[in-house]
Image (cartoon, helix red, strand yellow):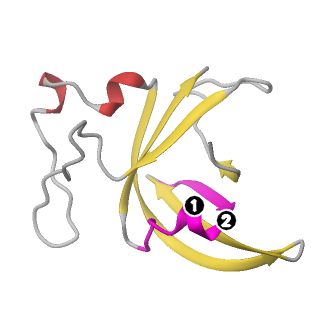
Amino acid sequence: MYDLDVVLDLNVDVYPVSAGDKLSVCIASTINLDGKSMPVGDPGQQVYDTSVGKRATLADSYDYVAFGKVFKYKDAAKDGKVKAEVYASFGGLLMQMSGDPKQLDELDVDQSVYLLIRKV
C-alpha cells in the first residue's frame, strides 16, 4: 500500500461516488494482463485495440476506466519532507498525486496512463 495523496476530478454523473465511499484506485501503463504495451500508431498516438472487448484485461476488475496522459511532474518540499507531485489529465478531468518520489518515479511527462477505480 502506498502513502499518497490523490486529488481527482471525477464526473459523478458517469461514476457516482459519495462522501465516505472507499475506493481502490490503480494507475497503470497498460490494461493488458501480460503487461505488454498497447499498440501504438504514429509516435505519440495511441490506437484503439479492437481485441480488448474479446479478452480479459485489468479493466475487468474495475468499475471505471479512463485513459489519459501525465502532463507535469515536479519535486516539492512539504512539511520539511521531499515530495513528488504528478499531474495527469483524463479527457480534461485532472488528477494530482503527491507523495514519496520513490513511489512516483515510474511516471514521466507525456506518458500515457490508465486510471482504474472500483468501490471497496
Residue extent of the magenta highlight = 92-109
Q: Which mark is residue 41?
A: none
Q: Which residue is mark 2?
A: 100
Q: How many numbered marks have been drawn onto this rendered protein structure? A: 2
Residue at horizontal 11%, vertical 69%?
A: 42
Residue at horizontal 18%, vertical 26%?
A: 53
Q: Which residue is mark 1?
A: 103
Instruction: Please check the rendered image and state whether residue 94 is part of the magenta-colored stretch, yes or no.
Output: yes
**Residue 103 percent location from the top left of the image:** 57, 61
Neighbor class of circle 2 (other Cα within 10 Å; few <14, some 14-19, many 20+) is some
85 is higher (above) or lower (below) than 46 = below
33 is higher (above) or lower (below) than 7 = above
Can residue 108 be seen by looking at this rendering?
yes
Q: Are marks 1 and 2 in contact (CB under 8 Å)?
A: yes
**Residue 76 percent location from the top left of the image:** 73, 78
Marks 1 and 2, how far apart in space?
6 Å
Instruction: Find residue 1 and report its image quarter.
Output: top right
